[in-house]
Image (cartoon, rainbow, N blue to C red):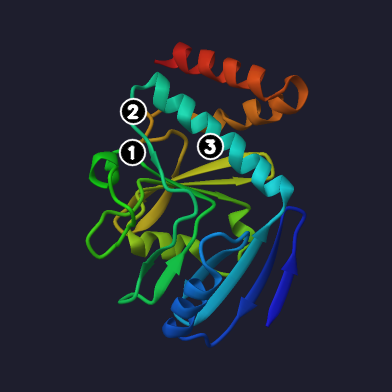
């Protein structure tokens, strides 16, 4: 077992864990827990987010809904839902996830089964590179079209192309807006507050569309 610590999260890594054990742990621990799990072909990582991690996640989620409002996009948030495929022996719980292009397909569902349902259109991860697992490979294998990674004041945007993620400056999900500029608003929130930052972000979107 390996334990790692960061300023925004704590991680525990377990090796040689069977798929059945992973499923049992998910069932026993339930959905109402602070930790997030990621499983990749025998390796299980359990991450417990701390306050800074959750703060940035909530701010980004707020901005995503502002984008939806201004671009007239329906958004179905699925949070840290467990997305898994037994045939791939891979599964994980993201920091946050959203159905946008496929929103209508999952709107009335009580659960997501990736054997029959589409993968989320957008995943957001905070401090992704501190993970001991290659979550890029896991998300790619599950078919997640767009991945955002926020790390130390920088937002990286990746689009899935031919089975691998390509870094890009604009978001294909949100009208190809240059959302790599988003961190300036996140940092601004530390000076002027979340509500004022949100207003400035909304005005920025209006100036771009």
Res. 194 mark: none
Callout 2–callout 3 Cβ contact below 8 Å: no
Which residue in the protein does label 3 denote? Answer: 61
Q: Is residue 178 above or below residue 122?
A: above
Left or right, 103 with respect to 20, comes to left
Where, by quadrant of the figure, is residue 15 drawn? Answer: bottom right
Q: Are marks 1 and 2 in contact (CB under 8 Å)?
A: yes
Around disc 1, counting alpha carbons within 10 Å, would you say few (fewer than 14), some (14 to 19), or many (20 or more)?
many
Q: Position of residue 39 (x, y in %)?
A: 49, 73
Q: Which mark is residue 100?
A: 1
Q: Return the residue nearer the eye: 71 or 22.
A: 22
- The answer to which image quadrant residue 100 occupies is top left
Screen quadrant of the C terminus: top left
Q: Is residue 161 above or below residue 29?
A: above
Q: Position of residue 19 (x, y in %)?
A: 42, 82
Secondary structure type for disc 2: loop
Tell me the residue at 47%/35% (across/down): 169
Q: In this rendered view, identify the residue nearer to me: 35 or 143.
A: 35
Q: Is residue 104 left or right of residue 3?
A: left
Position of 184 relative to 110 (above/below): above
Disc 3: CA contacts within 10 A as few (<14), some (14-19) or many (>=20): some
Percent of width and height locating residue 199: 58, 16
Residue at 70%, 30% in the rendered image: 187
| Residue 29 screen position, x and y as percent | 55, 71
Quadrant, the N terminus: bottom right
**Cα distance in 3D space between marks 2 and 3:** 14 Å
Helix, strand or loop for disc 1: loop
- Reading the image, the residue beneath label 2 is 73
Please report whichever mark, 2 or 3, sits nearer to the chain's N-terminal start: 3
């Amino acid at each position: 077992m390996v334990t790692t610590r960061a300023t925004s999260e704590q991680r525990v890594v377990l090796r040689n864990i069977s798929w059945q054990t992973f499923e049992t742990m998910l069932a026993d621990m339930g959905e109402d827990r602070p930790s997030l799990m990621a499983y990749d072909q025998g390796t299980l990582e359990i991450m417990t987010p701390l306050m800074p991690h959750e703060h940035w996640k909530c701010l980004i989620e707020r901005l995503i809904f502002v984008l939806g409002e201004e671009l007239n996009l329906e958004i179905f948030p699925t949070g840290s839902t467990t997305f898994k495929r037994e045939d791939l022996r891979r599964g994980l719980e993201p920091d946050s996830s959203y159905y946008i292009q496929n929103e209508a397909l999952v709107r009335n569902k009580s659960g997501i089964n990736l054997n029959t349902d589409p993968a989320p259109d957008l995943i957001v991860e905070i401090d992704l590179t501190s993970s001991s697992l290659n979550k890029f490979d896991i998300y790619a294998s599950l078919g997640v079209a767009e991945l955002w990674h926020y790390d130390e004041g920088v937002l990286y945007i990746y689009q899935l192309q031919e089975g691998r993620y390509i870094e890009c400056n604009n978001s294909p999900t949100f009208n190809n807006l240059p959302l790599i500029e988003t961190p300036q608003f996140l940092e601004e929130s530390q000076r002027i507050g979340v509500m004022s930052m949100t207003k400035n972000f909304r005005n920025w979107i209006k100036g771009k569309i």
